[in-house]
Amino acid sequence: MALNNIFSNFTLKDLNIEYPIIQGGMGIGISSAELSGTVSKYGGLGVLSSVALDYLISQKFNKHFKQREAVKIEIEEARKISGQKPLGINIMVAIQKHYKDSVLGALDGGVDVIISGAGLPLQLPEIVAEHERVNEVKLIPIVSSARAFELICKRWQRSNRLPDAVVVEGPLAGGHIGWRDVEEAYKPENRLEVLVKDVLKAAEPYQIPVIAAGGIYTHEDILQYLEMGCKAVQMGTRFLATIESGATNRYKEAVVNCKEEDIILSTQPGSPCGLLFRVLKESPFYQESLAGERAELCNKGYLMINGKCLACQDRTLAFCICNGLLSAAGANEVEKELYTVGANAYKVEEIVSVKELMSELTNSRNLILS
Ligand SMILES: Cc1cc2nc3c(=O)[nH]c(=O)nc-3n(C[C@H](O)[C@H](O)[C@H](O)COP(=O)(O)O)c2cc1C
């Protein structure tokens, strides 16, 4: 098959996305309305992040909003840029506190696609079934194994539903990755190419499109996964370092200036949700946590599990991710900044606009001229 035939639009049933490129959801506040709206405007699928929108939207409009309403407002803000082009939202299972409200708010706001990972989104179809837009929204789980994918399919069938596509995220991704142990994450059988093959095989009987994520950087990388049989790719780090992303300039500069050895999977202290979390070693917040110098402050609680946050119990095991990430999006002036990146962040050489990046990734001059 000729390569230019492979690089075609990505369809999710009746939803047509011009390019097979999904900008991965990036919390907190990185895949903002401005970033995601602009990616959708230029033909990719822009994906908002639902994390801490109650805080961010209340701060932006100087008025208190609960999570469900805040999610709806964020979608409306993104639509001012994307128009009616396809738009998605990422909702993390690990944020138990707001999971249901985030899903319902996303449906209220008229989002086209919900992408959900950082845990198994087993209950997603049941929650969606409570809303009148149940048959309009497309649902995409994120998995790191064929086993997780099969488990999700089995459970979703109880609600007479299957995933509309599945994202397979490998160990090179930014943010949380699907492993708890560094050695395990880097085993050869967990390389993205291997995971993608397994999930392609598992998804074939259901005819479910597979999307690859984690470490995909160039147009050629995208072609590699499309050739393997994926229908699209999801990319985070490239979009983190765009003009439109919600990261502070210090964060973007740290990405441009980092070297390969500066990027680590944090453990002890790591993320309170227990999954490995990739950070820039020199993040001011991470350094402060390592040195045990951070003041006792844990007042957001987005990652509480059964009413408890690990960072509140033992600061040698976990750091308070909520405040560090809010600072990295310029939304908390008290705390230092925590920078999460993908393993390929050291390749980023400059901060570019979404339009320039989309033109590079699609290998298309038309975008530049439009
Ligand atoms: C700054 C940053 C924040 C992220 N936050 C989230 C998140 O909130 N939820 C999620 O499911 N994935 C998150 N991710 C993962 C991305 O959506 C994406 O799948 C991943 O970064 C792909 O790997 P890449 O960065 O090598 O392209 C994040 C990634 C980055 C770089």
Image (spheres, rainbow, N blue to C red):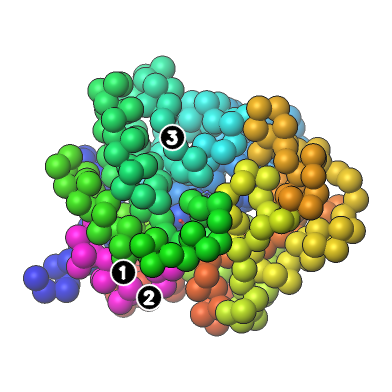
Q: The C terminus is located in which quarter?
A: bottom left
Between tags 3 and 2, which lies in front?
Answer: 3
Residue identified by numbered label 2: 218
> Toward which corner of the image does residue 251 lie, by quadrant?
bottom right
Query: Can residue 197 be seen from the camera position used here?
Result: yes
Q: CA distance from mark 1 to mark 3?
A: 26 Å
Residue identified by numbered label 1: 222
Q: CA distance from mark 2 to mark 1?
A: 6 Å
What amino acid type is highlighted by mark number 1? Ile
What amino acid type is highlighted by mark number 2? Thr
Mark number for residue 121? 3
What amino acid type is highlighted by mark number 3? Pro
Which x, y percent locates residue 104?
49, 26
Label 1 beta carbon within 8 A of ligand 1: no
| Left or right position of 350 against 304 | left
Report the magenta residues as a range: 214-231
| Left or right position of 210 against 60 | left
Which x, y percent locates residue 24?
46, 55
| Left or right position of 311 against 215 | right
Q: Secondary structure at mark 2?
A: loop
Residues tagged 2 and 1 counted as in contact (Cβ below 8 A): yes
Residues tagged 1 and 3 counted as in contact (Cβ below 8 A): no
> Toward which corner of the image does residue 266 lie, by quadrant?
bottom right
Q: CA distance from mark 3 to mark 2?
A: 30 Å
Which x, y percent locates residue 18?
27, 57
**Residue 62: within the magenta?**
no
Q: Earlier in the sequence, mark 1 or mark 3?
A: 3
Q: The N terminus is located in which quarter?
A: bottom left
Q: Identify whether 167 is placed above or below 236.
A: above
Q: Identify whether 142 is placed above or below 360.
A: above
Please report the residue visible at 44 percent of the width from the left and 37 percent of the height from the top: 120
